[in-house]
Image (tube, grey):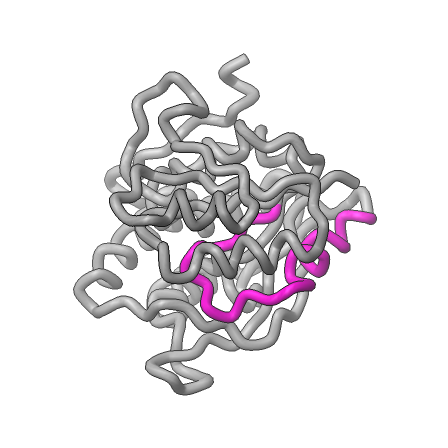
Amino acid sequence: MRVSVVIPALNEEATVAEVVRSCLADAPEEVIVIDADSTDATARRAQEAGARVINWREVLPDPPRPGKGESLWRGVAAARGEVIVFIDADLESARPGMVSALARPFSSPDIHMVKARYRRSLDGQPHGGGRVTELTAKPLLRQFFPELAHINQPLGGEYALRASSARQLPFVAGYGVEAGLLIDVGQRHGTSAIAEVDLGLRVHRNRPLEELASMADVVAATILTRAGVAKQGVEQRPALEDRI
């Protein structure tokens, strides 16, 4: 099965090269870095590490909208593999084997999404990370989508989708993209179509509370919109197959 790795990146020059090298160690079909107009050396370092670097403006003619989900959506459009593995560019704990682990469950035709399970570090401690996950996403999922309450990291950036499924799904433009995809896969294919694999400890750049607050707003709006109770929807891109 051909595997494409998509790494969304915006000003992650300190970590992107090691993320790329760790992904390439698993010999996927391709490693694509979708660069969202970085102003630092992200694109150069990713290319030097062996990635296929594409500026997000070059993938589709639509002017890009701000947000991580936009980069993922464009990455799906650019990917050639049958399985698409998403890896965050700010991951400090990247290591060989994670791409293979996320792709392996797709040997079953019933699997459409694979999420990573892991512990999240905070300020050098092995626990305490994932504040938006624990304080926003998980409580809302337990309330409105209890069938998904067992998912260890609903907002984690390390996961994989069957390419054919990814092209049937809308992508929330911002940080609600992971929550939206999780809910949509569960509703479209059933929760048994979502597998989890253990990737141990995740270390990445911890964000200050003022940044987490805006992320929590988008995540909450995404889940509440999917539940049909939000007053206003979230901005999202349509399924790519609808553009054909």
Above or below: residue 60 compared with residue 217? above
Q: Is residue 2 left or right of residue 118?
A: right
191 or 51, nearer to the observer: 51
Q: Position of residue 175 (x, y in %)?
A: 35, 50
Can you name the residue that lies furthest to the top here?
244
Q: Residue at x 52, y 58 (%)?
A: 19
Q: Is residue 22 visible?
A: yes
Quadrant position of the N terminus in the picture = top right
**The quarter of the displayed image where residue 234 is located:** top left
Q: Residue at x 41, y 60 (%)?
A: 90
Quadrant position of the C terminus in the picture = top right
Q: Position of residue 61 (x, y in %)?
A: 38, 17
User: Which stretch did the figure color magenta?
Assistant: 85-107
Above or below: residue 153 compared with residue 233? below
Q: Position of residue 46 (x, y in %)?
A: 46, 48
Q: Is residue 143 visible?
A: no
186 or 12, nearer to the observer: 12
Can you name the residue that lies furthest to the left here?
210
**The quarter of the displayed image where residue 30 is located:** top right
Above or below: residue 41 compared with residue 244? below
Q: Is residue 91 magenta?
A: yes
Q: Is residue 92 magenta?
A: yes
